[in-house]
Structure formats: C-alpha cells, structure tokens
Image: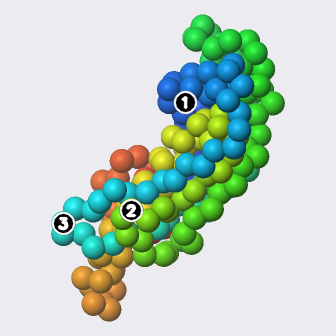
Amino acid sequence: MNGGSLLAPEDAALLVDLYELTMAQAYQRYGMESVATFDLFVRRLPRWRKFLMVAGAGTVVELLEKLRFSGDQLAYLESTGLLAREFLDSLERFRFTGDVDGLPEGTIAHPPEPIVRITAPLPEAQLVETLVMNQIHLQTMLASKAARVLLAARGRRVVDFGLRRMHGADAGVAGARA
C-alpha cells in the first residue's frame, strides 16, 4: 500500500484531467519544456480553523516514482481522438524526472505557506497536477480533522469509526491513517 492510499501506482497515470493532457501536449508541441515550479498551498482557512496538519507527501512521492502509462491506458487515450500520435508516444516513455519538496508529514501549516512544491519540465509538472492535489488535499484534510479531534479529546482515547461514512475505501484508509 502507498502510504495510506489504495491507489495502485499502475492506475495513477489516468488520475489526470483532460485539461492537463491537452496542456502538456500543447507545451510539447510548441517546445515549452523548460523547468517550471508549481506550489500547492491553501489560500485561506475557514475562520474557525487555525491550522492544517500536512499529510500525503509520502504517497505522492511513491506514486510519482512509479508513474507510467500502460498500453491499455494509451489505447484508451488514443481512442478519444484528442491527442496526437507524437504526444501519445511521449506518454509511453513518460517517467517523472522532477523534484518534490514539501513540508514533512505531521507538520502544522498555515495559509499561504507552500505544502508541496513540484519542480519539473513543464509538461511533466502539468501532467501530475491532479494526482498531487488529489492525494495532498484528502490526506491533509483528514489529518487536520484527526488533529482537531485529538485536541478536543484532551488526552482521552479516541476510536475511529470513519470508514462507515467515508467517500470510498481509499478515503477510509487514509482517514484511519491520519
């Protein structure tokens, strides 16, 4: 298991919006492949929330290290008719070569502090945006809630029954991990 995620690395390549695929294709087509940096941060918290508890960076790193487009995934993308053969060929060779920097798991964060920073060739950084946001958002939200529950418990034992009402099995496992 990937640091609390049930998302298998072989399935992660299509955890992407069509927007990212078409933008990466355009960047490649027009030679816009210089290194870019993207920061994931929170603009503001609800007024009754004071902090975030960072989680999910380990999952992101594990998934990015193994990120590949399978033959079936490429065949599906080709069937859409939206992507050029040259771009699909580049996805077949795709390996994330960028850097991932961020706050360690369990760190308290405040807006607008960067939680994760991705530095990579522009098409690569664009392709992983949804994956990074998806994993960090869910796990940080759950860890932040868990931290608030523990603070409210004031040293009393806390038991997790969250799987019953979570948004899918992956969210339940990530919630229990938090």
Residue at the location (77% across, 40% down)?
95
Mark 1, residue position: 20
Q: Locate residue 120, reporting x and y percent.
A: 68, 46
**Viewed as shown, does residue 158 lie left or right of 98?**
left
Q: Are marks 3 and 2 in contact (CB under 8 Å)?
A: no
Classify residue 123 as left or right of residue 109.
Answer: right
Q: Is residue 2 visible?
A: no
Q: Which residue is mark 3?
A: 47
Question: Dividing the image into 4 quarters, which one contains the N terminus?
Answer: bottom right
Q: At x 60% / y 7%, what residue is drawn?
A: 81
Furthest residue toward right: 93
Structural crowding at the residue carrying mark 3, measured as other residues with C-alpha within 10 Å and reported as few (<14), some (14–19) or many (≥20): few
The mark that comes first in sequence, 3 or 2, is 3
Q: Quarter-wise, where is residue 10 in the image?
A: top right
The amino acid pointed to by label 3 is: Arg
In-front residue for pair 62/87: 87
> Is label 1 in a helix, a strand or a loop?
helix
Q: Which mark identifies residue 7?
A: none
| Dot 3: element | loop
Q: Position of residue 80 (x, y in %)?
A: 57, 11
Distance between the alpha carbons at the discs numbered 1 and 3: 32 Å
Q: Amino acid at mark 2?
A: Pro
Would you say 92 lies left or right of 147 here? right
